[in-house]
Image: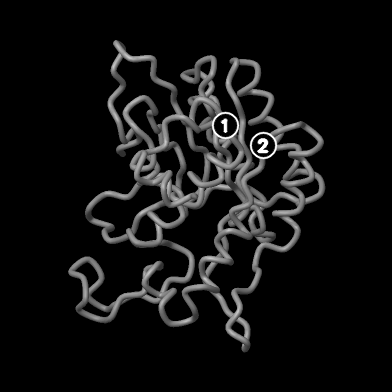
Amino acid sequence: MKKTQKGKDHNQNTVSIYVAGDSTASYYEKARAPRMGWAQVLDRMFDKKIEVHNEAAPGRSSKSFIEEGRLDKILAEIEKRDYLFIQFGHNDSKSDDPDRYTDPDTTYKSYLKKYIDGAREKGGIPVLLTPVERRGFTVDGEAKRSHGNYPSAMKELGLEEDVPVIDMTEKSMALYTEAGPEDSKDLFMWLEPGEHSNYPDGSEDNTHFQEKGAVQIAKLVAEEVYGLKLQPLHSHIEKELKKEFF
């Protein structure tokens, strides 16, 4: 599986972003196209001084990601000044699956803290990202919530541990509301039968993105990086993209 979207040039003072997360962020091979995770295109938001290591994996929760040794792999590689972006919540709520379930007020926080502590022990910089929302609308055409207390629990942990938090739950909801119930389908894996060879029967998926959605979510992440002035990432956002933030 392809993890890194940029090759590291050791002659440059590069900084890495490691991404720990689930299927909404992960990399997908061409056989799964047009499905894309937002971290799969995150490298497009930065110049060549920033390298993205996308370690997100489908179906993982903050708990199962650790239990499978995936965090250990990141911590074996992450270096001082590198970033660890942490986004979980979709699968933590699977109450019927003890291998993945975490309680938002207790075990969810305690598992997330392992990412924070691990990154800091290596001199890295942790950043929490609340889970992107699923596509769903109220009768009034407003995007609706599906993640319960997980986003608020993550924000509470960010305050407790003095960790930057990017509120992708709210950001993604605003994006979907602006697009509306119909046009928002273009962000997700909504395909008509025969529209794409990989999905001959079509698809009606309100969780996973196709390229347009992945790019829009990655732009929201970059916009928050810029707004929070996370250095040196702030200084290496693509110039053309920065113009959209003003």
Query: Residue 238's spot in the image, x, y percent?
Result: 36, 39
190 displayed left or right of 120:
left
- Mark 2 highlights which residue? 164
Sequence order check: which comes first, mark 2 or mark 1?
2
Up-down: is 212 above or below 113? Answer: below
Give the left or right position of residue 102, taking residue 56 as reference. right
Q: Amino acid at mark 2?
A: Pro
The x and y percentages for residue 95 are 69, 60
Determine crowd level at label 2: few under 14, some 14-19, many 20+ residues with C-alpha closer than 10 A. Answer: some
Instruction: Identify which residue is drawn at 59% across, 74% down.
Output: 143
> In this figure, which colouring scheme has been used for the structure?
one colour
Residue type beneath disc 1:
Leu
The label shown at residue 197 is none
Toward the bottom, the furthest residue is: 139
Question: Which residue in the protein does label 1 denote?
Answer: 230
Q: What whole-number distance in Å separates the C-alpha atoms at marks 2 and 1?
A: 9 Å
Q: Are marks 2 and 1 in contact (CB under 8 Å)?
A: yes
Indicate whether 121 appears above or below 67.
above
Q: Position of residue 33 (x, y in %)?
A: 26, 59
At 65% from the left and 52% from the top, the residue drawn is 92
Question: Would you identify the image quadrant in which residue 162 lies?
Answer: top right
What is the secondary structure assignment of the residue under circle 1?
loop
